[in-house]
Amino acid sequence: MFEGLIGLFRDYYYWLLALHIIAVISWMAGMFYMPRLFVYHTRLEVGTEAYEMFKVMERKLIRVIINPAMTAAWIFGLALSFGQDSWNAGGWFYVKFAAVLIMSGFHGYLSRWRKAFERDENLHSEKFFRAVNEIPTILMIIIVFMVILKPFQ
């Protein structure tokens, strides 16, 4: 049963890869943008029209773009990894996988912080959000280097 599924993943490798890349690009766009929205959101007075508009923007960004894109990236990425037997590819794959897990955890924190803004209970400063804005970039660099260079084979 699993052999047939793995064969299917291999047969449709380029389709899965294209869909994975599209999903990752969409996910990363949201991961870069959401902390930036938080930076500007912290500058606004609670209850103002602009403050409420940011709540809507952040909610739509996470629900319409970031969550579906992350889900698709995981589905297509796992399909690719099983189709290519990446689990036996060497240390590079595990470094990449760990970075993706951390990226997913960061995604969870973005959701948590968005909900705090939604409840008018944000506890973090503009400076904090400027700093965490760099996390997705660092993780993306690690992931791309692992996938392209495949060190630790």
Image: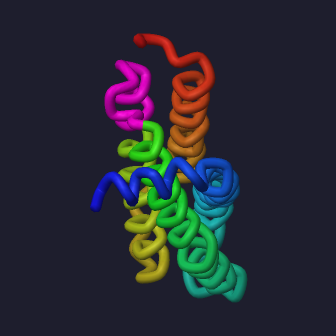
Total labels drawn:
0
Measured from the top left, where is residue 122 in percent x and y?
Answer: 43, 67
User: Would you say 90 lies left or right of 20 here?
Assistant: left
Can see residue 29? no
Q: Residue drawn at (62%, 80%), measured in percent from left and top?
A: 60
In the picture, the quarter occupied by the C terminus is: top left
Q: Nearer the viewer, residue 10 or 41?
A: 10
Location of residue 45 in the rendering, given as x and y in whole percent from the top left corner: 61, 75
Of helix, strand and loop, which mostly describes the magenta segment? helix
Quarter residue 51 falls in: bottom right
* Figure check: 147 above or below 2: above
Q: Is residue 12 above or below residue 65?
A: above
**Rendered view: 123 above or below 130:** below
User: Could you say which quadrant of the image residue 149 lies in?
Assistant: top right
Please indicate, yes or no, whether residue 95 appears anywhere in the rendered image. Answer: yes
Which residue is painted at 40% across and 52% down in the image?
6
Percent coordinates x, y for residue 16 in the rendering: 60, 55
* Residue 90, above or below 58: above
Of the pair 18 and 84, the residue shown nearer to us: 84
Horizontal and vertical percent position of residue 136: 55, 42
Question: Would you say 33 lies left or right of 89 here?
Answer: right
What segment carries the magenta color?
85-98
Residue found at x 51% / y 61%: 70
